Amino acid sequence: MRDAAVKLALLPLLAAQGWRARKSARQLPEPDGPREGIDGEGPLLRLLVLGDSSAAGVGVAHQREAIMGRLVQSLSQTLRVAWRLNAVSGATTGATLARLTAEETGPFDMAVVALGVNDITKGATLRRWLGQQRELCERLRTDFGCAHVFVSGVPPIGSFPLLPDPLRWVLAEQGRRWDRALIAMLDGMDGCHHVKAAESLAPDQMAEDGFHPGAEVYEMWADAILKQLRPLL
């Protein structure tokens, strides 16, 4: 793979750039607001959002601006939504699998998953990540009752202002390759749906740390999920 070869050749530089980016990054908190609740009137929908800092809403001030809040606000107009957010900054797919086992009992009707960037930046292999993504989706379906799991695609890492080149280019190429593999895997799994991320983002659409989504990106993401979710209700 071209990006793997380039990554190997540039490894000392990439390691130094990654260290500097982590040291200089502004550490944004997870937003205020509840992480579970029941909203709306109508048929019951039990919804779980599971993942990393993007699922947690880092980059905005309150959960109502984040992915969970936006989904609940829209769905609760016609449904009684029993919702729960289980997301932690820095989470990998493997750590999330462990957290799911330890902290959740369900059942849920639908789940939204947002994972991948930390797996990339922490050196996971594509094979291991896909295996963990498969296990996560299968467990949500079989053990927690989810009729549908919406798996968010890898975001456009090349649009993250925090990252310098060539680190940004290498991680962006890796992210695109991983996302293509994720699409192919999910295509063969019943009830599991890939939610495509934006191809690119402008700097002013990102949070002030240059790494996390801003409010506009959360809105775009929620719209993309709802476009697939609503016909399945």
Image: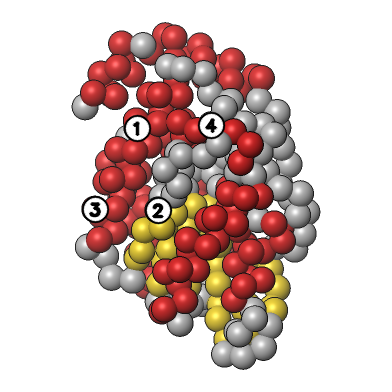
Determine whether label 1 and label 2 are within 8 Å by CB.
no
Q: Of marks 4 and 2, which one's residue comes earlier in the chain?
A: 4
Give the residue at mark 3: 184
Question: Which residue lies at the image location 49% right of the left edge and 52% below the top edge?
Answer: 114
Q: Distance between the residues labelled 1 and 4?
A: 14 Å
Residue 204 lies, in percent from the top left, at 63, 36
Classed neighbour count for the residue bearing mark 2: other residues with Cα under 10 Å, few (<14), some (14–19), many (≥20): some
The reply to whether residue 56 is in sight is: no
Which numbered marker is on residue 196?
Answer: 2
Which numbered marker is on residue 183?
Answer: none
> Which is nearer the eye, 176 or 12?
176
The reply to whether residue 191 is in sight is: yes
Q: Of marks 1 and 4, which one's residue comes earlier in the chain?
A: 4
Classed neighbour count for the residue bearing mark 1: other residues with Cα under 10 Å, few (<14), some (14–19), many (≥20): many
Q: Is mark 3 on a helix, strand or loop?
A: helix
Q: Is mark 1 on a helix, strand or loop?
A: helix
Residue 167 lies, in percent from the top left, at 44, 20
> Which is nearer the eye, 40 or 86?
40
Residue 46 lies, in percent from the top left, at 56, 77
Determine whether label 4 and label 2 are within 8 Å by CB.
no
35 in relation to 232, above or below: above
Q: How far apart are marks 1 and 2 (CA)?
A: 16 Å
Give the residue at mark 1: 174
Q: How far apart are marks 2 and 3 (CA)?
A: 13 Å
Q: Of marks 1 and 2, which one's residue comes earlier in the chain?
A: 1
Which amino acid lies under the numbered mark 4 shown in the image of this protein? Answer: Phe
147 in relation to 55, above or below: below
Which numbered marker is on residue 160?
Answer: 4
